[in-house]
Image: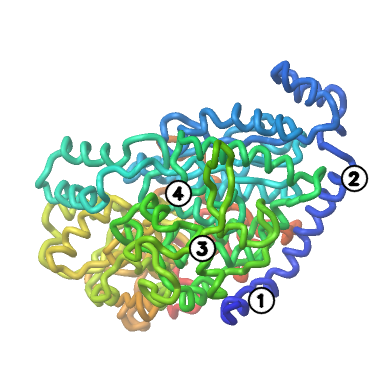
Amino acid sequence: MNPIIQDITDRIVERSAASRTAYLARIRRDGEAARAKGPARAHLGCANLAHGFAGASSEDKPALRGTAKPGVAIVTSYNDMLSAHQPYETYPPELKAAVRRAGGVAQVAGGVPAMCDGITQGRAGMELSLYSRDVIAMATAIALSHDMFDATLLLGVCDKIVPGLFVGALHFGHLPAIFVPAGPMASGLPNKVKARTRQLFAEGKVGREELLDAEAKSYHSPGTCTFYGTANSNQALMEVMGLHLPGSTFVNPHTELRHALTEAAGRRAVEITAHGSEYTPIGELVDEKAIVNACVALLATGGSTNHTIHLVAMAAAAGIVLTWDDLARLSRVVPSLTKIYPNGQADVNHFRDAGGMQVLIGDLLDEGLLHADVLTVAGRGLDHYRSAPALVDGELVWSPVTGGSADLDVLRPVSAPFSADGGIHMVEGNLGRAVSKVSAVKPEHLVIEAPAKVFDDQLDLLRAFEAGELDGQDFVAVIRYQGPSANGMPELHKLTPPLAVLLDRGQRVAIVTDGRMSGASGKVPAAIHLSPEAADGGPIALVRDGDVIRLDSAAGTLELLVPAEKLALRTPAGRPLSDAQWVGTGRELFAAFRRMAGHAEQGAGIFGVSGAESPHHGPGLGFPSEAGASHLETGTPVGAQPAGLAR
């Protein structure tokens, strides 16, 4: 094992000892009871159980009424508006049939919302996106709270859906859980052409119809969008954590192999319940090694920066305290091994065809960069994930992948990486701490020192671009009051095309924001997820137009080049919307989330660390520093300077 990765893992274990021990004690009590007492529904009262099978089919009702067969919950994010989730329409009957053949009985226990950041970009609905992760976690818990089940099949793909399902399932950590992917759509319009059309539209050189035609040729059929954003990063992480069946991640929807893998997931769910010989509870599977493996895979593939938030929250649900410092240290030793859009021109189908997860995992294991001795839904050991599935004479079989990459422009070995370190860096300085995705940024753009242009709303920047006010000058765009306590921390994808236009014209530009960009900043250098945010007293609220900012993503520094004594004389500028102003598109329903949201660095959620509960439980509990005390909750003046910044 790489000694630095082992040391980081050991530190996480030590830091998490109290909360992880308490979490495991809880789920082990539940697991021991499950193994001793048989299927969960057998212990319901007669009225309770009758309600539980009243709507079942005539085929399943006798099994549900009986007490011999394990019950499997299906929790689904199906809707037919979103391409990634449309394939799930047919999964419940397929999974029920597979579970039935394996000796169990399955029911759709509940549904969770699945919103699309692609649809809500730049709109009020995007301000609910990050909050939806915690809603999904709670909806998952509600589905499983009926205590009818012995295992869980989780159907989700995109953005906040997988992390939310993951967090919810870990609060029923004694239950085995398998994530069942839907797969990416076939490749459409090349990403380079799509990106160029977006820039041409931003410049006014093509119209809406041309842009819509390009977008429709890119996002054209059922399945996940093929670029390597949060959705496909989710899928890669579920495989490397051992929560997918091996090789199932990037198989296209509605194919024979996809159908066979879905059925296999149903069968496997029965095999790993407490009532079989391979009991595999998710709370035991997701340990410190699995979390580190996920971080390594994220860095090696240049995955979504959203996971610098999600992985912290996901680990916390298992009683594990992960920090940005852990990710920063890992990034120094994990090489960048892929070029998948927006970090290159290939898509996830090209990555799969180059060898995909099997070649990537195998190489990282061989080089000691992944923990091999982990529990997975396929059995003990990550070596299971060196094998790829195929249909041979109609039967699903797995065979070891022994060769290397079939396309070195897309996937490289550790011995010849695209770069020696990971594609995500942490930056810090007198403005706070932030995340910088560097895998798509040209080396000459990694360092910028330029005057600030400050905006409190992304639409103001877009208007300034359209008016020509940003032409012919170098600048750092500061977009503030975009954090979880301010407005739900929306993604700011719509800023990428105009800023990319200016970059292509030879201007030096960058973004500094307490909002998110999911890695879609692409070639534009960016410091995102800035913490503390403006609404929680972060010094970004003190920045003025013309202040010089230096962002060095290579060295990991972010500095406001204004003397401390001058800053001490300033009062915060701007403010987030009040609750009374933050209305429409259902946002008013989430005002409580704004008051409770933790800092980005601690997962930007409303839950604490499992196992660290106390009578004073609150957001961020169990993290190394206090989180979740927003201005709306504490009365802290908006933009007030944090302790340590001289007044």
Counting residues from the start of the chain, the first of labels 1 and 2 encountered is 1
Q: Nearer the viewer, mark 3 or mark 4?
A: 3
Secondary structure state at the residue bearing disc 3? loop
**Picture coordinates of residue 274 (x, y %)?**
80, 46
Front-lying residue, 57 or 163: 57
Report how far apart the C-alphas of labels 1 and 3 lie in the structure. Answer: 31 Å
Counting residues from the start of the chain, the first of labels 1 and 3 encountered is 1
Q: Nearer the viewer, mark 3 or mark 2?
A: 3
Secondary structure state at the residue bearing disc 2? helix
Circle 2: residue type: Ala
Q: Circle 2 is placed at which residue position?
A: 36
Q: Circle 4 is placed at which residue position?
A: 231
Counting residues from the start of the chain, the first of labels 3 and 2 encountered is 2
In the rendered image, the residue lying farthest to the right is 36
Report how far apart the C-alphas of labels 3 and 2 lie in the structure. Answer: 42 Å
Circle 3: residue type: Thr
Q: In this view, does 94 lie to the left or right of 280?
A: left
Q: Circle 1 is placed at which residue position?
A: 10
Counting residues from the start of the chain, the first of labels 4 and 2 encountered is 2
**Picture coordinates of residue 331 (x, y %)?**
47, 73
Q: Circle 3 is placed at which residue position?
A: 402
Q: Which residue is drawn at 25% across and 49% down?
A: 190
When asked about the image quadrant of residue 541, the answer is bottom left
Which quadrant of the rendered structure holds the N terminus?
bottom right
